[in-house]
Amino acid sequence: NAGVIQTPRHKVTGKGQEATLWCEPISGHSAVFWYRQTIVQGLEFLTYFRNQAPIDDSGMPKERFSAQMPNQSHSTLKIQSTQPQDSAVYLCASSLETKDTQYFGPGTRLLVL
Amino acid sequence: GEQVEQLPSILRVQEGSSASINCTYENSASNYFPWYKQEPGENPKLIIDIRSNMERKQTQGLIVLLDKKAKRFSLHITDTQPGDSAMYFCAASRANTGKLTFGDGTVLTVKP
């Protein structure tokens, strides 16, 4: 089992550019979560899907951020018009069911210059 | 929502001694409390968790206690080793929501 896979591991973008982050959950897991980690804000919940359906996006910034899960094997987090304050490690996690242990991927380190 | 407070933020102990980290939560509906260990440049890894139907859980040198009345839970690492040095996060959630609310983390350093 390869665990949760995230690509790319590192991404550098210029201010105003778009960034798309990819997550492949553990096979058979029905719940996929996105979190963001920064020194200042710590680990913050962004959004999650269950059986590909969006369930809770209460942590997503209302503008510029969107997430999708087009099939059971991957989810994407898209940030439009990136800003320096978007710089963070974006972590994807999956769990067998919503109530079960969440396993984190290695994260994508996003740097917006 | 939920808020989780974690203390201390920095903890230094001598090898072989025990280390304790405390967390409090606000939402009485929270019923799942995992602990994650994160080493530099790595992803958070679950080390132990407890659900609200238990007050104590122990595994491999780790003890977690839950006091629902006080809305407090804690991690105790017995016989610490240098390999235990890392960032530790507590978290809380309602199991049917899945959304984890994390504490701010504790940097544990175990001195040889």
Image (spheres, coloured by chain):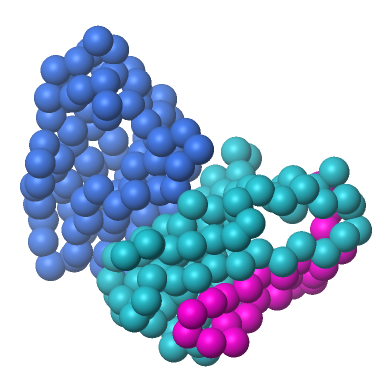
Q: In this view, does B18 lie to the left or right of A54?
A: left
Report if residue A35 is visible in the image: no
Residue A30: x and y, percent? 38, 82
Q: Locate the C terminus of chain B and report the quarter of the image it occupies.
A: top left
In the image, farthest residue toward the front? A1
Report if residue A19 is visible in the image: yes
Q: Residue at x 83, y 58 (%)?
A: A82
Look at the picture and state if A61 lies above or below B64. below
Q: Is residue A64 left or right of residue B71?
A: right
Q: Which residue is drawn at 10% across and 41% down?
A: B60
Q: In this view, does A10 lie to the left or right of A2?
A: right
Between residues B70 and A3, which one lies in front from this camera angle? A3
Q: Which residue is drawn at 48% across and 62% down?
A: A5
Tag count: 0
Residue A87: x and y, percent? 72, 48
Residue B65: x and y, percent? 15, 48
Between residues B2 and A11, which one lies in front from this camera angle? A11
Look at the picture and state if A106 lies above or below B1. above
The part of the chain drawn in magenta is A62-85
Q: In this view, does A93 lie to the left or right of B23?
A: right
Residue B110: x and y, percent? 28, 19
**Who's cyan, chain-wise?**
A
A65 falls in the magenta region:
yes
Between residues A38 and A28, which one lies in front from this camera angle? A28
In the image, farthest residue toward the top? B112
Q: In which quarter of the image is residue B99?
A: bottom left
A63 falls in the magenta region:
yes
> Chain B, which colour?
blue
